[in-house]
Amino acid sequence: MKKTLLSIALGLVISTHFATAQPGPAVSTAKAPIQLTEFKPLPQQIQAANMTAEFLTRFHYKATPLDDAMSEKIFDRYLKSLDADRVFFLQSDIDQFNAARTKLDDAILGQDLTIPFAMFNLYQKRFKERLTFASDVLKSDFDFSEKESYFYQREKAPWPKDDAAMRDLWRQRVKNDWLRLKLAGKETEAIRTTLAKRYETTLTRMNKLKSEDVFQLFMNAYAMSVEPHTNYLGPKAAEDFDIAMRLSMSGIGATLQDRDEMATIRELVPGSPAALSGKLKVGDRIVGVGQGANATPVDVMGWRLDDVVALIRGPKDTPVTLDVLPADAGPDGKHVTIVLVRNKITLEQQAAKKSIQEVKTADGTRRIGVIALPTFYQDFDARRRGDKDFKSATRDVARLLGELKKEKVDSVLIDLRDNGGGSLNEAVELTSLFIGKGPVVQQKNAQGRVHIERDGAGVIAWDGPMGVMINRGSASASEIFAAAIQDYGRGLIIGENSFGKGTVQTVISLDQMARSEKPQYGDLKMTVAQFFRVNGGTTQLRGVSPDIAYPTFTDADSYGESSYDNALPWVQIKPADYQTVGNLKDVQAMLQVRHEMRIAKDKEFQFIKEDIAEYKQQKEKKEISLNEAERRAERDAREKKIKEREEFRASLECKDKNSDKCLKAKSKLNKQDDGLQGSERSLAAELAEEKANKEAKDVYLIEAANILSDEIELIKTNQKIAAQVMPKLAAKAKEMQ
């Protein structure tokens, strides 16, 4: 077994990948007909499936036999992963598959994965047929004056009964795509060109899949049928997971994106070989990669992005040769050959960062120090080697707290929004920065034994007022931290109810189990324990409830632990022996009143509440009109509302009409939906949109700072409240000196 951790949300990244080296030459844009590969299981995959079953049936926290009942669950989950919206398979295909419903256990245990691979092969055949038909539909015209609707929420819809029903469904899908571009002002030929390229790109992506992708999809259907946070990671996914945990790799330091079949530079990491060379810029296309200073680059035009990235990554201090088509060059432009020496790259965009929110009050300005932590990271290998400078979330936060102390902040806010978890050790050690040596979390294994986790050092780094900001995307390690801060009465929890993941995973290297010298079997991330709060409850299923709650879009049935059909239940055990350091009950009630009074007068929160009401109303709709007049009226009403809001925001920013804030606010006034998908826009437009979103006013963060400012005022002006909120913490801090 490798490291024990609490899950980071993993996903298959299609559009953007982080690179450590790049490659090749331009070719003709004429496309040959796409020939799909018929996938077959590889010998190492058959062995990996067998090893996975051994672990899941014997050592999982919820060990479940691999039998016919489990086979049916795997079948349904696998089918859903292939065609969740039921737009590719026909009912006759499903009838054909049904013979395999109770055979997938035999496929794994009998070391014959022909059935799941055959299901995928038919899926990709149907995928090609549907996209080819969609492209053909573009040659005809549509009548947008008809009263017609497209039923797009199809998860529970019946499978199309025959080819005619399927063709009509896809005709409606294409008609909807066309109408959206038409409403955005696009002309007929531009619409045809845009959609033809969109469908071709989608089909091309399918053509880049490999046997490893098919196997990982099927094995995840098995793993997640046991329990939602158990996953199989193929060799490439396992490598990416390790990088995500240690926040470092060896390469050139360029973020790549697949655009027009070329690995395009989206970002250069400051201080990296790519940035320091001065030879690469955003928008440059890497079309060839060679291993060594004098190597002839391998043409990687049209390659999968992760394959290009794999060529670019390599050992520290080794050279890599890149064949680059500059951003401002046409397809037949002059190429540039660049040689870079790989180095260790730190993914700082995922590391802890600090900022200061200033809150104006009647008696001056209060400064709230904010530490945003995207994940609980740790370089396990470096720590095990005894590296004194190993990368760690706790170390980074402790350093930032020291800086905030010097900057004389009045309170600290730990922002864990959308932090999906990470290292259990980091969750425990980070908590100790605020509570000292007390127990942080309890773990119960499959045998029922309970172990209490605490940091033996427990040196408090911040003994002042604090808060923790969470939302529905805050999970696992984030919930351990927030729950401990809440149970100890150490700080206020602000935001939304958290995800509700109360389980602990370990990552098992199947390569180590098989004594394989090269990575070929992948990893198994398996649930081995459940964690419990020090008060004896668990965050499993219910999550952490905020002390001060924000209005929310979250639907518990569609996102969070409660959305899983096989989530572990909420249970309770004996509380740990711990001492609270404060009591926030009285102050919480007063802060709630002030919060509600403030947001009732806040225009941005009024907008949020309006949007929540509209979202809930729209969510109930299963269809969308394909009538142009109706859609145009809907769009005009939506854009009118958006414009009125932007005019309001511009009025606040335009006291100085020439200020940057004013000019940016005005630039949004006439912004309309362009009907395009992300990669269909220029890279410059995409990056500008991303920058604008990052710079947008964060009303939730501002309100959290206001809440902590109110707390400081109550502590300073009310001795009884001060004695409740801070006393034991102050005594503990004194003890530790």
Image (cartoon, helix red, strand yellow):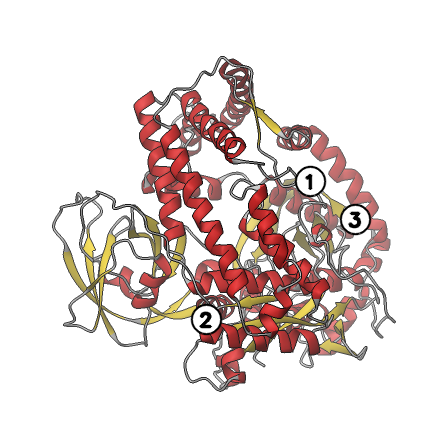
Q: CA distance from mark 3 to mark 1?
A: 32 Å
SS class, disc 3: helix
Query: In the image, what residue type sits under mark 2?
Result: Pro
**Residue 35: where, in percent of width, then height?**
33, 51
Q: Which residue is mark 1?
A: 552
Asked whether disc 3 touches disc 1, contact meaning CB atoms under 8 Å apart, the reply is no
Q: Which residue is mark 2?
A: 235
Which of discs 2 and 3 lies nearer the camera? The answer is: 2
**Residue 688: where, in percent of width, then height?**
38, 40
Quarter of the image that includes the C terminus = bottom right
> Residue 201, located in which quarter of the rendered image?
top left
Query: In the image, what residue type sits under mark 1?
Result: Thr
Q: Is residue 552 left or right of residue 259?
A: right
Quarter of the image that includes the N terminus = bottom right
Nearer-the-camera pick, 285 or 40: 40
**Residue 247: where, in percent of width, then height?**
47, 67
Nearer-the-camera pick, 547 or 178: 178
